[in-house]
Amino acid sequence: MATKRYPGDMTTPSPTTDWLRLDQQICFSLNAASRAFGGVYRVILKDLGLTYPQYLVMLVLWEHGDLPVKKLGEHLRLDSGTLSPLLKRLESAGLVRRERSARDERSVDVRLTEEGVALRERALEVPRRIVAATTFDVDEIRELRARLDELTTALDSAQLEE
């Protein structure tokens, strides 16, 4: 079956490219990939009893240990209004504990519980399963992640220039 070609096809750049076609939008491609990843993560993380956002919180805590909510939000690029309900659910599940900071009563620290620490061992399988779900090898995934990090930095810089 032949692939359908049209003037806006990215493989055949021309002066007549319609840059307002949906398939020309990098934001749409990134969003579609993100949604597809979300579906794969939903299935994989079900065994751990975590949602994808909860998994991200756990990744940061496994990597950095106890953190103030504000610092956790900075790592995840989330504000406290989004992060607080996630932490509340993780606390209800017995994976984290939130406590007022002894140094600054305005700050809340997040700590892994024993169950949260133990969950890390079971989570070690997640990245392997994610790689297996793609058609990429590990080096291609590293390269893609590096390019996406560059894109994020460029877009963050563009926002600062407004």
Image (cartoon, helix red, strand yellow):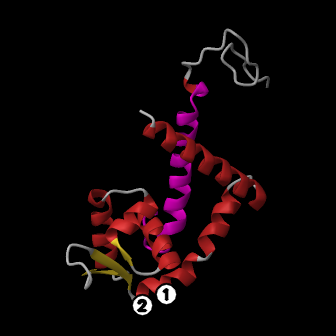
Residue 41 lies in magenta, yes or no?
yes
**Circle 1 crowding by C-alpha within 10 Å: few under 14, some 14–19, many from 20:** few
Given contact means CB atoms under 8 Å apart, are the residues at marks 1 and 2 in contact? yes
Q: Which residues are magenta?
A: 23-52
What kind of residue is marked 1? Ala
Please, what secondary structure does the residue beneath circle 2 have? helix
Residue 68 vertical position relative to residue 40 in the rendered view, above or below: below
Residue drawn at (71%, 56%), measured in percent from left and top?
Answer: 141
For the C terminus, give its image quadrant: top left
Q: In terms of depth relative to the viewer, which is nearer, 39 or 155?
A: 155
Please, what secondary structure does the residue beneath circle 1 have? helix
Q: Residue 58 location, x and y as percent?
A: 45, 73
The residue sitting at the left extreme is: 105
What kind of residue is marked 2? Glu
Q: Main secondary structure of the magenta part?
A: helix
Q: Which mark is residue 118?
A: 1
Residue 152 vertical position relative to residue 8 in the rendered view, above or below: below
Residue 43 lies in magenta, yes or no?
yes
Q: In terms of depth relative to the viewer, which is nearer, 7 or 77?
A: 77
Residue drawn at (54%, 18%), measured in percent from left and top?
Answer: 20
Residue drawn at (66%, 47%), measured in percent from left and top?
Answer: 147
**Residue 93, can we see it?**
no
Q: Residue 125 location, x and y as percent?
A: 62, 74
Does residue 25 appear to the left or right of 52 in the view shown? right
Q: Which mark is residue 65?
A: none
* Disc 1 to disc 2, C-alpha distance: 6 Å
Q: Which mark is residue 114?
A: 2
Residue drawn at (46%, 81%), measured in percent from left and top?
Answer: 65
